[in-house]
Every structure is written in structure tokens, then in C-alpha cells.
Amino acid sequence: METYKTVLTSSLNSQGTLFGGQLLKWVDEYAWTAASLDFPGIKLVTRAMDSIDFTAGATNGSILRFVIMQEHKGITSVTYHIVIYCNAPDVKNEYVLFSNNVTFVAVDSSGKKVALPL
């Protein structure tokens, strides 16, 4: 799945760059969206994110491109790899802003793990 997001003033930190917590929220939301499209009707909850390492910043007006790919499917869990590219207003070439893996687990209505469909 691929989607886009524009960095607006409301998402900036005190240094004038994208707030890391906001980026993580989008990562979780968009990865969950991809997983939900892959497994319709299955209740999925976030189990884990890999190491969080912010290697670059994004400024106001940057356009972020989220590329989300299924990396691994287990019996009850699925992992997605996310790469976020940044097209900043003052930079000619797109660059990698952030990447991570997010793992979701399938659960029933009581929160107990259940098998994902084949």
C-alpha cells in the first residue's frame, strides 16, 4: 500500500520539524490500514514496533510518502515494513525519512489471540 501525508504546522515540534510522536501515530495508523485491507473482518491490534531511529527531519509543507509492505505472516500475527520518503519544499530529491516494522496480532472479542486466515 502507498499513501501520502502533508506535514502541517500543527504537527511540528518546538524545533520546527515533524514531531516524532505524530510520525509514529501515522506509521501505526497506516500500517493498521494496510493490515485491515489484507485481512478484512479480522480484529488486529498493534503488538510491536521495531527499534525507533529518527534519521532525518521533515519541515512544514513536506510531503511524506508511506510505502507499506507485508513482510511476514505467522499463525496469529503479521508484520509490515514501512518506509517513509520525504519530499521537502527546500530539497530537490526525495529522501528516506524513517523506516520500521510494525507487527499486529489477530484477536477475538475478548482479546485472545486467534489464527489469521490462510
Image (cartoon, rainbow, N blue to C red):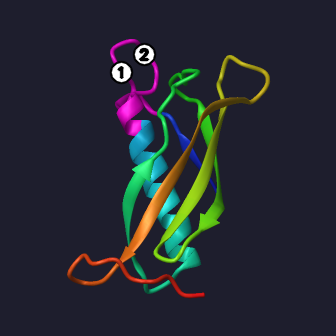
Q: Residue at x 50, y 83 (%)?
A: 40
Q: Residue at x 44, y 86 (%)?
A: 41
Looking at the image, residue 7 lies above or below residue 13: below
Give residue 77's position: percent from left, percent from top: 48, 69
Give residue 8's position: percent from left, percent from top: 45, 33
| Most foreground residue, 19 or 106 | 106
Give residue 38's position: percent from left, percent from top: 58, 76
Q: Amino acid at mark 2?
A: Gly
Is residue 54 magenta-colored?
Answer: no
The secondary structure that most of the magenta stretch takes on is loop
Mark 2 sits on what residue?
16
Neighbourhood count class around disc 1 (C-alpha, 10 Å): few under 14, some 14–19, many 20 upward: some
Q: Residue furthest front?
A: 75
The C terminus, quarter of image: bottom right
Left-right relation of 4 to 47: right
Task: Read off the magenta span.
Answer: 8-22
Left-right relation of 35 to 92: left
Mark 1 sits on what residue?
13
Neighbourhood count class around disc 2 (C-alpha, 10 Å): few under 14, some 14–19, many 20 upward: few
